[in-house]
Image (tube, rainbow, N blue to C red):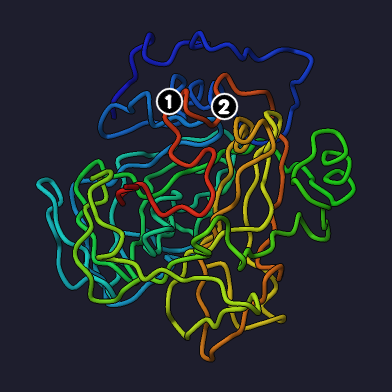
Amino acid sequence: MTKPADDLFPDHDGATLKPTKAGVHATGILPAHAIKGLIRDQEIWGTKEIEVDQVQPASLDLRLGTVAYRLRASFLPGKKSSVMEKVEAFAYHKIDLSEGAVLETGCVYLVPLMEALALSERTSAAANPKSSTGRLDVFTRLITDNGAEFDQVEAGYKGHLYLEISPRTFSILVRAGSRLSQIRFRRGQPTHTDTELRHLHDQVRLVDDQADIDGGLALTVDLKGEGATGLVGYRGKRHAGLIDVDRRDGYAIKDFWEPIYANEAGTMVLDPNEFYILASREAVHVPATHAAEMVPYNPLVGEFRVHYAGFFDPGFGAEAAGGKGSRGVLEVRSHDVPFILEHGQTIGRLLYERLTDVPTELYGQRIGSSYQRQGLKLSKHFKTS
């Protein structure tokens, strides 16, 4: 276990936003300075020293460890088993990640992470793929010892963390230290109702259009596009090249993606089991007091889903277009049958949850965030010009 240096995660990091007593709550999502407190108190620790830039405004990036296990199938350990007991039963072979290794499409891998937890009984956590991971169609899920659910960490959990990885469209090159997922910490069980969400929208205007709030804030799909090109999305090319997940601006879009353009009807057909990058019609704003999570829309209205739930950090959209928000990027897959999407069709919903305190840093260019001011945007791995 590596103990962080006291000056690596100071109480406050000198940012312009300072936590104040006026906005402090006993329950909610922990902001960055509280996550740094968990690191100082060794409720979060690592086999290798945790790096300052792993801490995001309301989440912590997780790093792959030095080995991966190729699995026969996905699994959950259940209440009576550890993850490594299951790995011994289900693993085909062990892969060294210290110098990098290829994870192939259609395969399932399990990687012990560098981070581990020793949470208090009041603190739980949830994980999600990082935005760049989802936009590469890499399916990841966090697993804990004795866990009965993916991506959920029970309050008071003490133990190691493991990541299931399954590339779906592109094979990827990863190495020890690569960051494919992120974790968010929560105190207590705060409620977040539609009534509260409507009140928040009245205060800070969460979208640049009329807000459809019913089980969360609706996001609809843009199939008309902007500008002269009429570009509305991309479809991933199967059997394309290898993507190094740590290489930024390294790949030509045309080698991996087929562009999709608007038609007069404002519709498109989702082919079964193909992967699409689309954008929301609405520009989204997440205020400094809240974080948001995208959840799939009800599958009863169609055989498609937003393939990956995603975290939206506090401050997302706050700097864009004069404070009018950033569009959400939608990672979409249709199952079993072709499905026709129409412009303005609801495709996902955002759940907003209060933070315990305003974070010392917000999502944006100041901390090197990749997707502030975004419209339709592929992952950071692809060249923009």
Query: SS at mark 1?
Result: loop
Using the numbered discs, state the Cα–Cα distance from disc 2 to disc 1 in whole angstroms.
Answer: 24 Å
Does residue 206 appear to the left or right of 339 in the view shown?
A: right
Give me the residue at 36% from left, 71% from top.
258
Q: Is residue 50 above or below residue 350?
A: above
**Label 1 CA crowd tier, 10 Å (few <14, some 14–19, many 20+):** some
Give me the residue at 80% from left, 34% from top.
204
The residue at which mark 2 appears reads as 362
**Label 2 CA crowd tier, 10 Å (few <14, some 14–19, many 20+):** many
Query: SS at mark 2?
Result: loop
Front-lying residue, 54 or 156? 54
Which of the labelled discs sits on residue 359, or is there none? Answer: none
From the top left corner, tell me how far across and down residue 157 is, in percent: 51, 43
From the top left corner, tell me how far across and down residue 147 is, in percent: 49, 59
Give me the residue at 56% from left, 23% from top.
34
Q: As drawn, which residue projects farthest toward the front?
A: 228
In the rendered structure, which amino acid carries the disc numbered 1? Gln
- Which quadrant is the N terminus positioned in? top left
The residue at which mark 1 appears reads as 42
Does residue 291 appear to the left or right of 14 in the view shown?
A: right
In terms of image quadrants, where is residue 300? bottom right
Q: As drawn, which residue projects farthest toward the left?
A: 99
